[in-house]
Image (tube, rainbow, N blue to C red):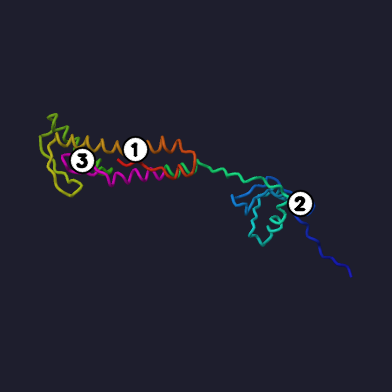
Amino acid sequence: MTDNTEIEENPWEIENGIPIYRNPVWDNLEHSSFSVDIKHSEFGWIRCSTSSEDTGVAKPLWDARENLEIQEYTEPVIDLTTFKEQKHQELRTERDKLRQVEFAVYNNANYQIRQEDQDNMNTFLTNAIGMLSGIMPRANFSIMDADNILRTLTPEQIIELGRAMKTKVEEIYARYWYARDVLLKNASTKEEIQSITILSN
């Protein structure tokens, strides 16, 4: 009786019972796992990992580690560009939140500095300048402070409040720019990037 069973060829190139490999390197400081490129007949070099806990197909590679002359562990290269971009987005969100929780102070009262508050103030400033230049009749302004107290301000006071709000927004942006353009730009490790925040006022 003839056995017509086909013998499946091993796609991994073997030499003396050990896969042909290159670039072996430990994956952790404890030396309990490593990665290595193994030569495949169809796909070429493929990166494979194995560890002391392997019980499947990777176990023979782990068992053969004594013959692989594995290099010492090297810290993996981290793509800091990705981490920096993620942190940049976090800083922008933090900057916008600061405009929600910090206030401009004028005449012992707090005023909100959100974008919508600044837009409203720009309208008041236009009218105040028109009044002071004689284009519009003079009148007082009613404006709500951050504590929901209605304040009555003259055109001159509106201009002063506008300056105070502008200064406060610029201060928040200056802290944001420092975090972005100094701290983030010069950070060289993942840990340094993760620790960056906008400084308190």
Q: Quadrant of residue 145?
A: top left
- What residue would you read off at disc 2? 13
Helix, strand or loop status at disc 3 = strand
Point out the stretch of residues depicted in magenta.
89-112
Q: Is residue 196 left or right of residue 132?
A: right
Q: Is residue 193 magenta?
A: no
> Which amino acid, mark 1?
Arg
Identify the secondary structure beneath mark 1.
helix
* Residue 99, image x, y percentages: 29, 44
Residue sitting nearer the eye, 64 or 11: 64
Q: Nearer the viewer, residue 37 or 18?
A: 18
Type of amino acid under label 2: Glu
Residue tagged 3: 105
Q: Amino acid at mark 3?
A: Val
Q: Is residue 98 magenta?
A: yes
- Mark sitting on residue 71: none
Rounded to the nearest angstrom, the CA distance separating label 1 from label 3 is: 18 Å
46 left or right, relative to 114: right
User: Which residue carries the number 1 mark?
Assistant: 175
Crowding at dot 1, Cα within 10 Å, few <14 / some 14-19 / many 20+, comes out as some
